Image (tube, rainbow, N blue to C red):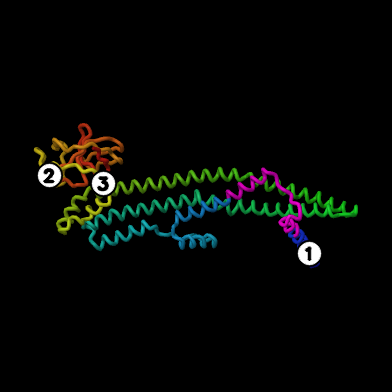
Amino acid sequence: MEFNVKKLASDAGVFFSRAMQFTEEKLGQAEKTELDAHFENLLARADCTKNWTEKILRQTEVLLQPNPSARVEEFLYEKLDRKVPSRVTNGELLAQYMTEAANDFGPGTPYGKTLIKVGETQRRLGAAEREFIRSASINFLTPLRNFLEGDWRTISKERRILQNRRLDLDACKARVKKAKAAEAKAAAEHELRLTQTEFDRQAEVTRLLLEGISSTHVNHLRCLHEFVESQTNYYAQCYQFMLDLQKQLGRFSGTFVGNAESASPAAATSPPAVAAATLPAVPTIPVVPTIVGVPNTVAEGVLNPNEVKPPASGTRRARVLYDYEAADSTELALLADEMITVYSLPGMDPDWLIGERGNQKGKVPVTYLELLS
């Protein structure tokens, strides 16, 4: 017990001495040992790294999980060292609602079929989002978090020790200056040499840790590349899923339009008309009133490329915006950025045109084209 009391008294004396030294430095009444410029640059670089890493980490968490309540829940589970429960993504939840709605409306109806198609795509989008979040958390968030909770805590601890060593060193210097008797001055100088040695040793330890920030940057750079790769794959999957959905809906959109028109006289307010109103303005191709030799099966959605002849006027050049894979022999496969000739036929679905490339001919979707003058 006596040892503990003495140690407590000693610690209190050291704390009081440091507090006095710090206060006198702030008031300009005591000299302060300055660190060299290189060391100060290392300190500034470390602080900058820590501050920006925190901001990037927090904003990436917001990007991956916009719901603040969900983020708080995940934080609590992490601190309690418990597994975060699996959470349904918004796309998967939307897919579930669309599928249930299709079953109520009738999966065989045009609206029901479309709900099922769109719902399936939303489910795939949700699954891709889940995989992207998982990959980004492992390859990007975890290394940033490990730096803040591991390396940075160690650096902060050693910096605090260095600060205390510096205060002790400056206090010893002040005592040497104040010592009058030779014996007191010799004791103060001996204590100063010991304190200087401890300060130099701690400064070297802290310097090595600060120089390790360069390795941290290299590691975070690699993690950033992996994050970009994950995000690129995610958006590429989403783009492909939506292209596939657009292609599937385009195959039977004409049937849906016909059903909608027969069910309601207000054809102008049908879903295709509303969708067309939301798309960018696209130059239209004049519809040829009559074409000799073209069978009436064109109006019914059946196209025989060998029987179709281009009109005398009304053909246009078009640039292909995206790759398109033909669904059957009546369609023409497209490659992005190629140029083709297009024209319309009487009774054709307005979402489709006839495209020609050399001796190849077939239906092509308008949304995949940029019509030129």
Q: Is residue 182 above or below residue 222?
A: below
Q: Badge 1: few (under 14), some or many (20 or more) residues near its Cα, within 10 Å? A: few
Residue 338's quadrant in the figure?
Answer: top left
Magenta stretch holds residue 27: yes
Q: Quadrant of the C terminus?
A: top left
Residue 265's quadrant in the figure?
Answer: bottom left
Residue 342, percent across and down? 21, 38
Say left or right for 322 vs 164: left
Q: Badge 2: few (under 14), some or many (20 or more) residues near its Cα, within 10 Å? A: few
The residue depicted at 42 percent of the width and 45 percent of the height is 232
- Distance between the Cα atoms at labels 1 and 2? 103 Å
User: Which residue is labeled 2 in the image?
Assistant: 297
Residue 291, percent across and down? 10, 39
Residue projecting furthest to the top: 358
Comes first in the chain, label 1 or label 2:
1
Say left or right for 276 vs 183: left
Residue 54, percent across and down? 54, 53
User: Which residue is labeled 1 in the image?
Assistant: 9
Secondary structure at badge 2 equals helix
The residue depicted at 36 percent of the width and 59 percent of the height is 93
Residue 328's quadrant in the figure?
Answer: top left
Secondary structure at badge 3 equals loop
Task: Specify the amino acid type for callout 1.
Answer: Ala
Residue projecting furthest to the left: 292
Secondary structure at badge 1 equals helix
Task: Specify the amino acid type for callout 2.
Answer: Thr
Magenta stretch holds residue 253: no
User: Which residue is labeled 3 in the image?
Assistant: 281
- Distance between the Cα atoms at labels 3 and 1? 84 Å
* Residue stretch in magenta: 20-49
